[in-house]
Amino acid sequence: MAAPLSDLTSWHADWKGLRVAVLGLGVTGFSVADTLAELGATVLVVAEKAQPKWADLIPVIGATLVLAPAGVVPPELDALEADLVVASPGYHPDDPLLVWAADHGIPVWGDVELAWRLRDKVVDAQTGKPADWIAVTGTNGKTTTVQLTATMLLAAGHRVAPCGNIGIPVLDAIRDPAGFDVLVVELSSYQLHSTSSMSPYSAVVLNVADDHLDWHGSFEAYAAAKARVYTNTQVACVYNTADPLTRTMVEEADVVEGARAIGFGLGIPGPSDFGVVDGILVDRAFHDERRDTALEIATVDELRERGLGATHTVADVLAAAALARSYGVSIEAIRAALAGFELDRHRIEHVVTAGGVTWVDDSKATNPHAAAASIKAYPSVVWVVGGLLKGVDIDPLVRDAVLDASGAVGARVRAVVVIGVDRQEVVGSIRRHAPELPLFEVDHDETDDVMSVAVALAAEAAHPGDVVLLAPAAASMDQFVDYADRGNRFAEAVRKHVGGNDGDDTLPESPVARPE
């Protein structure tokens, strides 16, 4: 007889005999199966498909793999009589397998819930404590903020690991035999949806805008999932002063007594905030004399010199500094961290400047909120946009991008190149708001050709002084492996075009619609 799930809150609890169905076999699914098998549970992995590198290891770790079409409950799953289902983040709440679990009264966890319960596998030799968690979520800027925070903690001498949705499963981090003082955990709305026990040291919701509505079903459900990150926060609930919803989330959260609300934003900060005064990033939250003075972190000019000067990146720096300061990191360590920090690939990444035109890869702008921030970073843009919209209405982004405050067209975005399977929604929006704006549609779905055509069209539209900006505002899986593949193909196409341009601006024959 397996122990009740309510008793399974430690690595050292008795997990033997627990029957667990693991849904999905990617990086996350394998980390779940491997962890549970190590604990002695009976593990059945159910997946629609599996890469050989994971599938071949399942019998080695003592688990069983069943491949079944999407939505089909295989007989092996019924026969398992599972005590628990652990689902990978890609499974929608209305997936037939999760509906099956609900109908059978089987609890469903995600990898983060499991990891939190098992976090004491490795503890500090002196204190006997497991690593603290600093939790980061938001529609845009999560990975940059996680990396910044981890770099600041490292500069202060802490043993730290960035993990979670950033690419390193949190279960792998908590099982690392070297151990850590603190984990900086990037959390998606998918992961938070199935997390209930976590009690982070500090947490932040960077911003909230329409995204993943196809998964959650509504903006309200999406926002509610994000808000869960503040539940049981111990020390600091960091929120965005420019996003009132994040403040409301903090006000409504059930936190550990004594936890503080700490704001960050680009304006002049209040006495519990981080902000900007006369071009200087300052801390007025973790400072004994915060009523009257502030601690200088860095200047906007210094950040700009390091490639961190875009408005949304400055906001990420402030959020990361707030999280790091909540953990006791000194201002000096934060300055040292910023001096050597570089943005992740495909985040407003400069590709090349040639002929007076700058080419920028922001393939990581996978939703309208991220794309809007990217567009605002440049005065004159040829915008490459489109992909898989995930149920999000792109019309507000298009309207704000192509029209200025007076309703004039082309004040910032001078031309648009549209790619992706959902391009008709983008094209239709542009035609409604700015019919005279130069518009190119890449009517081509072959991955190998999409970017070469898009780049050629963008080059035709661009003038000296323009930035050709890949900010898709959409997911990439319609035509590419992921956002990195999309960005790499864009950069490769740019370099081929620039390197092969001998002065002849004639566009090669390609299946496109001409600008209107």
Image: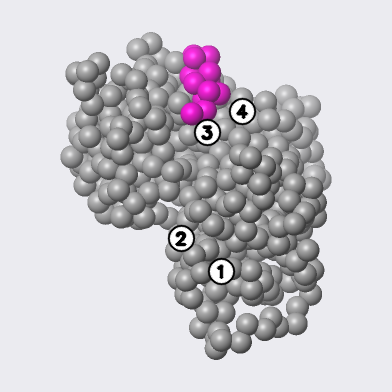
Q: Who is closer to the viewer here, 54 or 152? A: 152
Q: Nearer the viewer, mark 1 or mark 4?
A: 1
- What's drawn in magenta, residue-wise? 242-254
Disc 2 versus disc 1: distance between alpha carbons?
20 Å
Give, as a three-letter code, the residue at label 3.
Asn
Pair 4/3: label in front: 3
* Residue at which label 3 appears: 207
> Which mark is on residue 463?
1
* Residue closer to the observer: 36 or 115: 115
Q: Residue at x 21, y 47 (%)?
A: 336
Of pointers 2 and 1, the one earlier in the residue sequence:
2
State how far apart marks 4 and 3 are (Cα): 10 Å
Q: Nearer the viewer, mark 1 or mark 3?
A: 1
Q: Residue furthest top?
A: 257
Q: Nearer the viewer, residue 174 or 91?
A: 91
Report the Cα–Cα distance between label 1 and label 3. Answer: 34 Å
Q: Amino acid at mark 2?
A: Glu
> Which quarter of the rendering shows the N terminus?
top right
Residue 263 lies, in percent from the top left, at 40, 25
| Residue type at tag 1 | His
Does the residue at mark 2 contact the one at mark 4 (Cβ under 8 Å)? no
For disc 4, the marked residue is 223
Q: Left of 401 or right of it: where is 81? A: right
Q: List x then y, in percent, for residue 248.
A: 53, 18
Q: Which residue, given by chain and number where applicable, does mark 2 sit on? A: 349
Q: Sequence order check: which comes first, mark 1 or mark 4?
A: 4
Which numbered disc, 2 or 1, marks the residue closer to the eye?
A: 1
Neighbours of disc 1 within 10 Å: few (<14), some (14-19), many (20+): some
* Distance between mark 2 and mark 4 Cα atoms: 29 Å
Mark 1 vs mark 4, CA separation in Å: 41 Å
Q: Secondary structure at mark 2?
A: strand
